Amino acid sequence: MCGIAGIVSFEGKPIFEQELRDMCAAIVHRGPDDQGFYMSANAGLGMRRLSIIDLESGRQPVHNEDGSVWVVFNGEIYNFCELRKQLQALGHHFSTRSDTEVIVHLYEEYGNDCVQHLRGMFGFALWDERQKHLLLARDRLGIKPVYYAEIGGRLIFSSELKSILQLPEVERTLNWGSVAHLFTFLSTPPAEAIIAGIKKLEPGHILTASRGRAPAVTQYWDLKFSPDYGKHEDYFVERLRHLLEESVRLHMVSDVPLGSFLSGGIDSSAVAVTAARFTPEPLKTFSIGFSEPEYSELDSARVVAMRLGADHHELTLGADVLHELEEIAWHLDEPFGDSSAIPTYMVSKLAAQKVKVVLSGDGGDELFAGYDKYSVEERERDAPSWPDPARKAMARISRAMPEGMRGRNYLRHSSLTGVERYLDSSTLFRRDDLDNLFRPEFSELLAAHEPWRARASYLDARDRHWLSNLQGLDIKTYLPLDILTKVDRMSMAHSIETRVPLLDHKLVEFAATIPGEMNLRGGTPKYVFKRAMRGILPDSIIDRPKRGFAIPLGYWFRGKLGSYVRELLLGDQARRRGFFNARYIERLVERHQRGRNLELQLWTLISFELWARTFLDGGARGCGCAAA
């Protein structure tokens, strides 16, 4: 696991090693063990290394036999031993025992198609000096990040946005399409960052650049939902058990101590109990709870830890996490509307005291239909729809009601149908809310962007089961933009590698063959996955209602953090920037204090404000907040 950075120039613009050193210094947390650089007339590659496999000889950049192909790599290739044997049989010679080197020799053998052979998580940059060719690649599910930008005749890339911001020619101008997406869906969009001109390489895509050709982005993998109605559910149960065991075993290859996050839910518990089979000593597990009992899942985590005889570690959080928020904002890299980043940061901090690699159960809800919203959609689809005149009347009444009035959201939601109704439930600020939230001149900038459009077109597909549409959308958006972003940034903040066995692409492709009716049977979410875990996990864990990674932010905002929220969002610094309508934010705060659940709206505003102070106002360079 590492952080990568690089610059490619085909127009005679120089590349300086100090630029790469500055870029790498900003992501030292991703690789505190070592650094390395490659420089040529047209390309510079840099990396920070977190030593996991081949501690002695696995330094990067790694090159081929004659030094014509170089790579910097962030991630893990879980089938590298198998690939190494195949490549050696074809005549390739290896100088290290690392998984990184297989990428170089795969490229020699297969060119850009080398990515098709990789089983793992990765963001890597490969430079072919002979062909003057760059290959930039991101793994299929988006577990590892890659940012890039074309600025001043050079192509710049890195594992994190803050690394690119170290270059003085990068202007810190807001991308208003990304702002619209953030305040609609809690995160910036799949292909664009919060800063104008900086992009994200999407999951399952490669970027290629060569002299005389413009950089081109190509998709090399996409998940196809192909339900296999010819198989009995027993087949899916047994196959799932086999693939889970295989994936966990592959994900446990490590030359350093390894543990597992344990929330007490079925996903992390399934990963932990499987991992425990492959460890001669008790598996180290890590859990986070809260001082407010209704939010804490420590009891469930303890049940699983005792079941597998784990070396269990836990931490209870209270409102005093306030002092960590600026550090969290620095490491998140962009404004981020999911407040579960806070406990993820803290559980990673706990785990970093004991291990360097940790397993996580992320992905199970998307693969096996575990989210409550899927069950809600099933009920709403089956419920009798209101006649058109009634829906139009409800829409008119809703628009006429004062903002914040009880019943307004219900009437608006009831007036919608199909895709619009489903997306309405997952929207943070709607169009009219954004008009009130932002000052008029910025509201006009937002009006040019419609974050709903791409999602609506995907959900409208008629060639898939409706549940597959919902799962597929979350795998393309919510999973990489929220869940995996949070896990990557918050764990790498503490220099630990998080691996996600449920997102092995072989297991993901298998999950896409499970019929939707089987995943959500009789209103039971994750039906097949729960059957597969029956007898392996306690029934109390399998049958417990889904909790999610909720934290008591709303409670804290009404109590100990109430003054902090006001000072941050309504203080002079935010007002001087002038993006928001302060009166509207004050109404949001007051409504929350009176009992309305607006914690996500307030947290997204807080995250944006902390980010703006760090990266817009402060112009953070080098290690910035991370060194404070």
Image: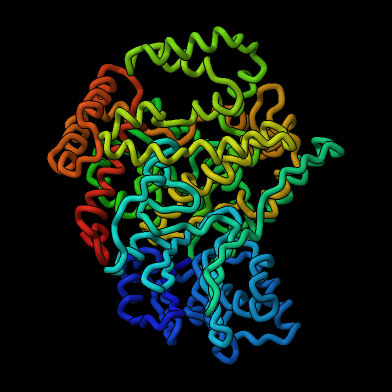
The figure's colour scheme reads rainbow
Q: Residue at x 47, y 17 (%)?
A: 412
Observer able to see residue 307: no
Question: Where does the image place residue 307, in percent across and percent down from the top left?
Answer: 57, 40
Q: Percent x, y for residue 396? A: 44, 12
Identify the residue at horizontal 41%, vertical 11% (top origin). Answer: 407
Q: Is residue 435 left or right of residue 137?
A: left
Residue 498, horizontal then vertical, whole percent: 49, 56
Q: At which x and y percent is residue 135?
A: 56, 72
Q: Quadrant of residue 289?
A: top left
Quadrant, the C terminus: bottom left
Which residue shows up at 74% across the image and 50% down it?
242
Q: Nearer the viewer, residue 277 or 62?
A: 62
Relative to 571, say whether 24 is above or below. Answer: below
Q: Above or below — where is 602 with respect to 217?
A: above
Quarter of image, res 364: top right
Count of numbered tags: 0
Residue, far bottom:
66
Of residue 467 and residue 77, the one placed in the foreground of this image is: 467
Residue 107 visible in the snapshot? yes
Residue 259 located left or right of residue 78 = left
What residue lies at 68% left-to-right and 67% top-to-bottom? 117
User: In which quadrant of the rendered view does residue 179 lie?
Assistant: top left
* Foreground residue among 383 and 120: 383
